[in-house]
Amino acid sequence: MALTGAVRVTDATGSPQAPAPPRGTKRGDGRAASAFLLPGAIGFVAFTAFPIVASLVMSFFDWPVLGDPSFIGFGNFVELFTTDPVFTTALLNTAVFVLLYVPVNIVVSMGLAVWISPRIVGRRYYRVLFFVPAVTPMVGNAVVFGLLYTPRGLIDSVFQTLFGVSAPNFLGSSAWALPAVVLMSVWQGFGYNLLVFSAALDAVPPSLTEAAAIDGAGPVRQFFSVVLPLMSPSLFFATVLTLISSFQVFVQPYILTGGGPGNSTTTLVMYLYQSGFQNFRLGFASAIAWVLFVIIMVLTAIQFLGQKKWVHYDQ
Amino acid sequence: MTSEALGTRSPGLTADDGGAGTPDGARPAGGVVPQRRRRRPPVVSQLLLTLALLLFLAPLGWMVLSSLKSAGEIFTTPPELFGESLLFSNYSNALDFLPFGRFMLNTAFVAVTGTVITLVTSALSAYAFARLRFKGRDSLFLVYLGTLMVPQEVVVVPMFLIMNQLGWINTFQALVLPWAFTAFGTFLLRQFFLTIPKELEESARIDGAGHWRILTQIIVPIAAPAFAVLAVFTFITYWNSFLWPLIVTNDVTTTTVPLGLNLFLGQNGQAWNLLMAAATISMAPTALLVLLLQRYLVKGIALSGLGGR
């Protein structure tokens, strides 16, 4: 299969290649290994491993920027889940965002990947153009959608011209703001999965769909019974990554709505940012980060357990 | 099979990439089979697809068109594509308001430095994990792997304190170093190194080449596509990064492009024509990069499964 990313993740934990034949090296390469690992490892410990541990520790503290931190046990977590209304809202908003964003992203990217079939002339250019907003700065993408969504902006203007009525005030209405953020995010982000699925589709041997066609399967049946199972590892991998990244949504609401109106588009990461870097409650912000991390871990684990039912790794 | 595929197909992609290496339908086996059916070109399908693409690109087109209008021509009903004249002066006005040239230089410096450090340290660690035998290798690799799952948000808070402690607020090293040592590059390159057959190194080893020479003269050239992918994506990630610069930078001397655009929005957000000029300036570099490197990127996504963002 083309997309062995997910497969390889599982490979990597074992030792995919047997240890080198004893011919070349008599003993281990300990000294060379430490020389090769050292530059990366210093940075890894200082900027990855240590901060992860520190973040967990901090989440049990009341930790102001100035002044002394004090240990409060599960205090931050208790506050988050019992007395903090904004956190509950942020959690809910994030869940709604994920539930809307992930399926729409997957369906759109899969649909377009199929649509841009080998019969389309210049398919490479279609693919890469759909991919452009995925690599331009998110701030820019969001600012552009601000001009589309704003009253008297492009969408409103089209509405008035065609229907004679104003469009909803997308970003100013608590009912519309979150869907508007989702729409902008899908527009921006589905290009990645489009490329992933395109590569997977190209790797499906045409002889198999041919055979299914001879057996009388229509295009729809061919897709769901032959193609989709064959590309299930890519679909699985893309879903896992899309889910993880969608829980981290921040820039889009930050730029488009500032979390409003009210708190209707405040997401977990946005609340983390506000708590840590506007209200300077660093321990509290760390606690939010760990809630986010645990949610992501649990959902990823569930997906990995569930994949046995529908993901086919063998040809 | 694996070794043959790699040996003959020069620095091809993953040894098992099937047809994914040629994404534009030029596959020898794929395109030939459906001889009898489906010969006519799908005109309607292509037309609708083009319409969908144009609709998709409309926001970006509207950005560029709006960046060339006067302030009074931004909001019109019905929408007008062009104003009275094309005001290219909006771009110089936007640049006068905030020094986007400087921001671009800052961002390029941060992105290039970060990419170079990432490539070098990842290559060294990946070589150790893929080719050297040492005690605790697999458990150490598991630790690296485990951190891949940790979202950036988990580390930003303590990272901010570390930067503060080091006096690195508003410095380039604060923008570069924290993200130059993540496990991702090591992981990606290690996986690629493992697909390179060891036999290729045997003769060099017999000639007395050390690990350094094997890495630089044999592995790196073969793994060039993997390095290219890692480089492009690391560069783009640095270029677009927003949350971290927002936390550690509040000075023009280290402001990056996305941060600059945010600043512009905050100070001059009602001047939509200038804002769109600034947005166009901010988005052009990575958009062009992708259009130029499209072949690599499409392959790279397949190679690394860098999807899902």
Image (cartoon, coloured by chain):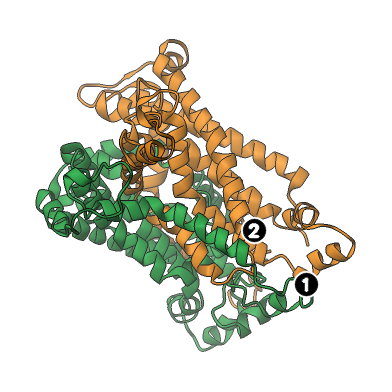
Chain colours: A orange, B green
The answer to whether residue A100 is seen in the rendering is: yes
Task: Indicate left or right for B118 with A26 as reference.
Answer: left
Task: Indicate left or right for B282 with B200 as reference.
Answer: left
C-alpha separation, residue under disc 2 versus residue under disc 1:
18 Å
Q: Is residue A217 above or below residue A286?
A: below
Q: State which quadrant residue A285 falls in.
A: top left
- Rendered image: mark on residue A114: 2
Q: State which quadrant residue B191 falls in.
A: bottom right
Chain under disc 2: A
Chain under disc 1: B
Residue tagged by mark 1? B37
Q: Which is nearer the eye, A289 or B272?
A: B272
The answer to whether residue A35 is seen in the rendering is: no
Q: Secondary structure at mark 2?
A: helix
Q: Which is nearer the eye, A21 or B160?
A: B160
Task: Indicate left or right for B175 with A121 as reference.
Answer: left
- Residue ID at (70%, 52%): A232
- Residue ID at (31%, 27%): A274
Foreground disc of the pair 2, 1: 1
- x and y, in percent, of residue A29 in the image: 52, 67
Q: Is residue B39 above or below residue A135?
A: below
- x and y, in percent, of residue A55 in the image: 39, 33
- x and y, in percent, of residue A140 in the image: 31, 48
Q: Is residue B231 above or below residue B84?
A: below
- x and y, in percent, of residue B68 in the image: 22, 55
- Residue ID at (67%, 42%): A304
- The residue positioned farthest toward the right in the image shown: A215
- Quadrant (top left/top right/bottom left/bottom right) for the N terminus of chain A: bottom right
Q: Which is nearer the eye, A281 or A157?
A: A157
- Quadrant (top left/top right/bottom left/bottom right) for the C terminus of chain A: bottom right
Q: State which quadrant residue A163 falls in.
A: top left
